Image (tube, rainbow, N blue to C red):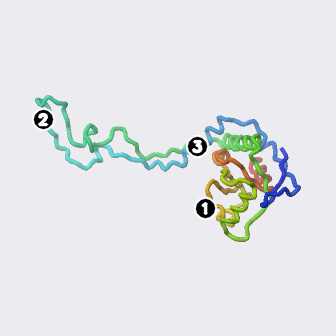
Amino acid sequence: MELNVVNISGKETGAKVQLPESVFGVTPSDHAIYLDVKQYLANQRQGTHKSKQRNEIAGSTRKLYKQKGTGGARAGSIKSPLFNGGGRVFGPQPRDYSFKLNKKLKSLARKSALSYKAQDSNILVLEDFTFDSIKTKNYISLVNALSLAGEKTLLVLPVQDNNIYLSSRNIQKVKVITVDQINTYDVLNCGKLLLTANTVKTLEEAFAK
């Protein structure tokens, strides 16, 4: 697939970029995407949830009333899960939700997500650029020039550029990452995927490894 390259003013430069079929033209695997997104979301979980069991409740262990003869159910201490303020039965405990996926499967999932974006014509290639200073209005001007105001966008840079990253950090529905940070969830979660000319080359090299 061949795309026109535009500058930060939203005008075509006359240059064209060929999206490599090995990255943007694979047959998408929905199951690979599902597993990769599931792992990404699982890895975001802190897993610090905790409820107290009856042995962790502060309270007396005295038997509330005699075992027999009351006409009611037998009861032990006030820390029993049956009473208000007692321990919780099989409550949540701290745990690690992360799990392992093979590298080839993760690579297939990311290429599948990029291929879906290419099929839906939701990829825009920008001329390589940078900002002279850190100003939020610089990135706002870029988004407005591309007619993407209010739309979720993901800009993928070949290498870290603090001026661009810090200029975009306070804007809603905007995210800036580098090629080595790209993941299936972010690609699918954005409405428009923004790449620079060098990003396309770097992506092809990264997936060729």
- 10 Å neighbourhood of mark 1: few (<14), some, or many (≥20)? few
Kind of residue at badge 2: Lys
Up-down relation of residue 89 to residue 57 (above or below): above
Tell me the residue at 70%/71% (across/down).
133
Q: Which residue is mark 1?
A: 170
- In the rendered image, which quarter is residue 141 located in? bottom right
On the rendered structure, is 185 left or right of 199?
left
Query: What's the distance in space between the residues labelled 2 and 1, CA to CA?
Result: 64 Å
| Disc 1 from disc 3: Cα separation | 27 Å
Q: Nearer the viewer, mark 2 or mark 1?
A: 1
Q: Amino acid at mark 3?
A: Gln
For disc 2, the neighbor class at 10 Å (few under 14, some 14 to 19, many from 20) is few
**Residue 50: percent from the left, percent from the top?**
39, 47
Where is residue 117? Give x, y as percent: 73, 43
Where residue 39 is drawn, which disc sits there? 3
User: Residue pushed farthest bottom?
Assistant: 133
Horizontally, residue 107 falls left or right of residue 91, namely right
How packed mark 3 is, by other alpha carbons closer than 10 Å (few <14, some 14-19, many 20 or more), is some
Question: In which image quadrant can residue 31 be found?
Answer: top right
Q: Is residue 51 left or right of residue 58?
A: right
Gap between marks 3 and 2, in whole Å? 52 Å
Q: Secondary structure at mark 3?
A: helix
